[in-house]
């Protein structure tokens, strides 16, 4: 479903992403874990087609994101760390606007709102919503067009404990029949949602493995890489 091969991004003298490769199948929720500045967002920007790679390829559902960008993006739903919402719009207005931009049927708005659990606030202004509902509104927009792939950049950042639990449950549910990759710099977040983790550090994948319950070995590795950063 997602195929990343020898992906590299160089900014001047800095190699932000260094020759990484991985695949993610439908039904997998995979965490991209690493400290701030490790290369997570740059990797996701290349996967979504927002940033051109210096070398390497990304295929979404078998479609190369740079050779056939429009076709590839139809397979993709993307939630950036800061959802690009308009606070003066209602949730419904924003989702209808997003559907038009994506070329999706506006009739899908209701289904996307229901799937992302924002139906109850569909007529409220986004600017009056909590952080959790804003994140879910952004996720509803990502679900328009019923994409088979979801890329979520720090989807739980800034959420309160109740919102956190709800978002985790939602991501798990969405990942049952989609290929999902989400990024975080907190191991506990990845462990709560994902069945597999890729740790990235200094632009390189240093481990790619299933997550076990109470995975002390994984926790030890991450602490060593981050120098004791929050896990």
Image (cartoon, rainbow, N blue to C red):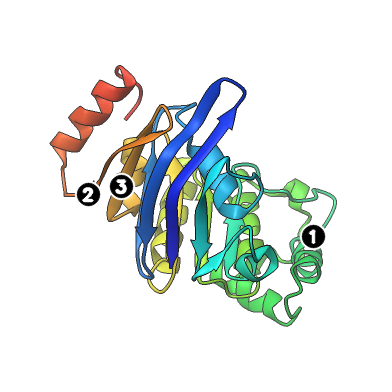
Q: Residue 63 appears at what percent x and percent y?
A: 55, 68
Please say if the residues under marks 2 and 3 sit with CB atoms less than 8 Å apart.
yes
- As helix, strand or loop, the secondary structure at mark 3 comes to strand
Q: Residue at x 50, y 27 (%)?
A: 15
Front residue (pair 121, 50): 50
Please say if the residues under marks 3 and 1 sit with CB atoms less than 8 Å apart.
no
Other-residue count near label 1 (Cα within 10 Å), few / some / many at <14 / 14–19 / ≥20 = many
- As helix, strand or loop, the secondary structure at mark 1 comes to loop
Q: Residue 228 appears at what percent x and percent y?
A: 29, 19
Front residue (pair 40, 163): 40
Which tag, 1 or 2, sits closer to the chain's start?
A: 1
Which residue of the protein is positioned furthest toward the front in this rendering?
A: 55
Q: Residue at x 59, y 56 (%)?
A: 78
Which tag, 2 or 3, sits closer to the chain's start?
A: 3
Front disc: 1 or 2: 2
Give the distance between the C-alpha atoms of the residues marked 1 and 2, in whole angstroms.
Answer: 39 Å
- As helix, strand or loop, the secondary structure at mark 2 comes to loop
State the mark number for residue 25: none
- The number of numbered badges drawn on the structure is 3
Residue 32's place in the image compared with 202, above or below, is: below
Give the distance between the C-alpha atoms of the residues marked 2 and 3, in whole angstroms.
Answer: 6 Å
Instruction: Please give the residue where the numbered disc 2 appears in the rendered image.
Output: 211
Other-residue count near label 3 (Cα within 10 Å), few / some / many at <14 / 14–19 / ≥20 = many
Instruction: Please give the residue where the numbered disc 3 appears in the rendered image.
Output: 197
Q: Residue 134 appears at what percent x and percent y?
A: 65, 51
State the mark number for residue 90: 1
Q: Residue at x 58, y 65 (%)?
A: 76
Quadrant housing the C terminus: top left
Q: Is residue 158 visible?
A: no
């Amino acid at each position: 479903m997602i195929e990343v091969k020898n992906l590299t991004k160089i900014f001047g003298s800095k190699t932000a992403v260094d020759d990484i490769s991985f695949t993610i199948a439908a039904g997998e929720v995979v965490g991209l874990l690493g400290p701030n500045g490790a290369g997570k967002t740059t990797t996701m920007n290349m996967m979504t087609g927002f940033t051109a790679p210096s070398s390497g390829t990304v295929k979404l559902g078998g479609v190369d994101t740079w050779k056939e960008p429009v076709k590839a993006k139809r397979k993709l739903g993307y939630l950036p760390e800061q959802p690009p919402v308009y606070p003066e719009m209602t949730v419904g207005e924003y989702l209808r606007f997003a559907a038009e931009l994506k070329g999706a049927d506006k009739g899908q708005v209701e289904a996307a709102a229901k799937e992302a659990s924002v139906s109850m606030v569909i007529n409220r202004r986004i600017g009056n919503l909590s952080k959790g509902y804003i994140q879910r509104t952004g996720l509803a927009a990502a679900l328009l067009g019923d994409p088979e792939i979801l890329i979520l950049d720090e989807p739980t950042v800034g959420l309160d404990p109740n919102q956190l639990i709800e978002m985790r449950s939602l991501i798990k549910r969405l990942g049952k029949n989609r290929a999902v990759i989400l990024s975080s710099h907190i191991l506990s977040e990845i462990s709560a949602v994902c069945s597999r983790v890729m740790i990235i550090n200094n632009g390189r994948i240093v481990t790619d493995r299933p997550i076990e319950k109470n995975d002390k070995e994984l926790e030890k590795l991450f602490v060593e890489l981050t120098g004791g950063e929050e896990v």
